[in-house]
Image (cartoon, rainbow, N blue to C red):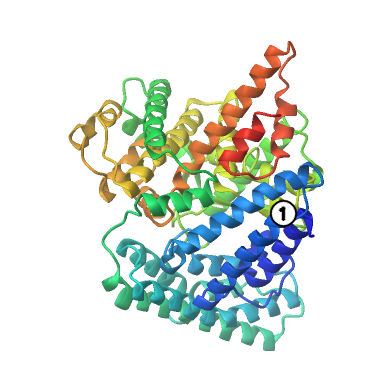
Amino acid sequence: MPTVTEISDRYITEMAQLDPARGERWGVASDPTRLTDYSPAGYAALRALLQRTLDTLAAAAPPADESERLGAGFLADWVAGEAGVIDAGERERALGIITGPATTTRSVFDLMDQSTAEGWRNIAARLRAVPVAMDGYRATLEVGLAEGRPAARRQAIAVADQCATWAGDGDGGWFKGFIAGTTSAGVGAGLRAELENAAREAGNAYGSLATWLREVYVPLATDVDASGDERYQAWARYLLGTELDLDEAYGWGWEELARLEAAKSLECAKILPGASFLEVRQLLMTDPARAVHGVDAYRDWLQAVTDEAIDGLDGREFDIDPRIRRCDVRIPPEGSAAAAYYTSPSEDLVRPGQTWFPTMGRTHFPKWDDVSIVYHEAVPGHHLQGAWIRLVKLTRAQKLGFVSAHGEGWALYSERLMDELGWFRTPDTRLGFLCAHAFRAARVVADIGLHTGRSIPAAAAAIYPGWAGETGRPWTYEGAIDFMVRAGGMDFDKAESEVIRYLSWPSQATAYKLGERTWLAGREAARSAATAAGRPFDLKSWHARALALGPLGLRRLGIELSRI
């Protein structure tokens, strides 16, 4: 009878072999010359692995300790959630600019070793595998069309544009630029020529996919952006680890947004008395003295904010192990979605955690709203949590796994924690923090509203008077973009990228605020228990115990946080 630890180890090993892109992201040893098989046969093999793991877990020996107890529940939920998404037919319509085979395949190269000739030989092999990977992906999309599961036309166009950006003009596009970094010793003329040919083939594969999407898929795609309740709940079980009460979450999202908009108004008055938020935003976005100029200077500034947070919190609010104090800021290539993101350190911690901040072609970078994003993505947010988990006693799957509502909820909680600790030292950056939270509350209502057809309530007009004419009506794509501009203070292009993201990834946008709500409820329960017992509440100790739980879905996380 296998143990939970053995099942967890085997699952990670087998998944990394089956899905090398996922293995690379985890930093787990796997064949560095292969890419993931996104064909119908590849997904069938994935579904078989998931079922085999569930069956083995059901017959496992009883958990031997606390880590196995937590690990068994996590793995069962995680695996069943992904199986449910596959069974709902979501992989046959996987078109999105954040996740999906096209994006995942390109981004795997960002994580590969580029310091040795051997590393570049592996890159050359993977580049040669790109055409087959894209052909397999296309075959899966064709199955979706044949079986009546098309993606939305808007998503197909967005992914086609993204692929065309990376394809370039037939000379390798992004892939050509990537291999231009071959400065390692031992990369001779032969290997360099091999890399150039492989890069050209990879770029052409993305160009071919872009053309097929535009000419074949787009005319057959659906005009319906919404997923509907059933598909939405399948994604929620996977990404949030719970069954959502959609009406409750929708109503709570509006209440939270109203609270945050009131707080934004107070902060705006400190910056430009008597001005509207949009007028204040215009000042913050255009004032040269409030911005960083140039991509290199922007990256350096983001790194300085990251390093300051690590130095300032270590030993005070958290005891940060020296092995995870490093978090590198990177700039992803053009064509990436607008949102910043994080990649975890490798399993052995040799590859550090990294935050990625897209520039969207800009050279002028206002600072007011990025400080909160740094805390979200790095420390005390994703990096602290993701790297901390590597060091505590958990099963292997839990160390490497990720539940969106657990991770994004902690990252949003981290922004609030930094506000509580006084780290937003100017009205500008505190408004940026409030906008980040209003933006996430707006995500809850916009995502549920767009996908499930719920109407816009009267509360919308109370929050945004300009929306008085929208109450009682269903959400629209254009309306959601305007809504995100008002709530988050972002420009139109970034807001549009956000809405396209939501429509390709049902329920994920709710993970931030609903996850934060669970973390806050757990903290308050612990504080109340300490008060009732007549002892002081030690927040630093509570954080350490809470992080040591590892990733869990919201249902389990709420239960576990109430116990610590």
Image point (68%, 59%), residue name? 26
Residue 516, percent from left and from top:
54, 34
Find numbered disc 1 in the image and state the secondary structure of the residue it sits on.
Answer: loop
Give the vertical position of 435 relative to 331 (above or below).
above
Looking at the picture, tell me which residue is in the foreground, 123 or 519.
519
Give the vertical position of 361 relative to 33 (above or below).
above
Q: Is residue 361 left or right of residue 1?
A: left
Asked whether the viewer can see residue 524, the reply is yes
Image point (76%, 80%), residue name? 186
Quadrant of the image containing the C terminus:
top right
Give the vertical position of 486 relative to 88 (above or below).
above
Q: Identify residue for label 1.
A: 352
Q: Residues within 10 Å of mark 1 (few under 14, many from 20)?
A: many
Q: Is residue 538 left or right of residue 217?
A: right
Looking at the picture, tell me which residue is in the foreground, 62 or 211.
62
The outermost residue toward the top is 534
Quadrant of the image containing the N terminus:
bottom right
Amino acid type, mark 1: Pro
Looking at the picture, tell me which residue is in the foreground, 522 or 378.
522
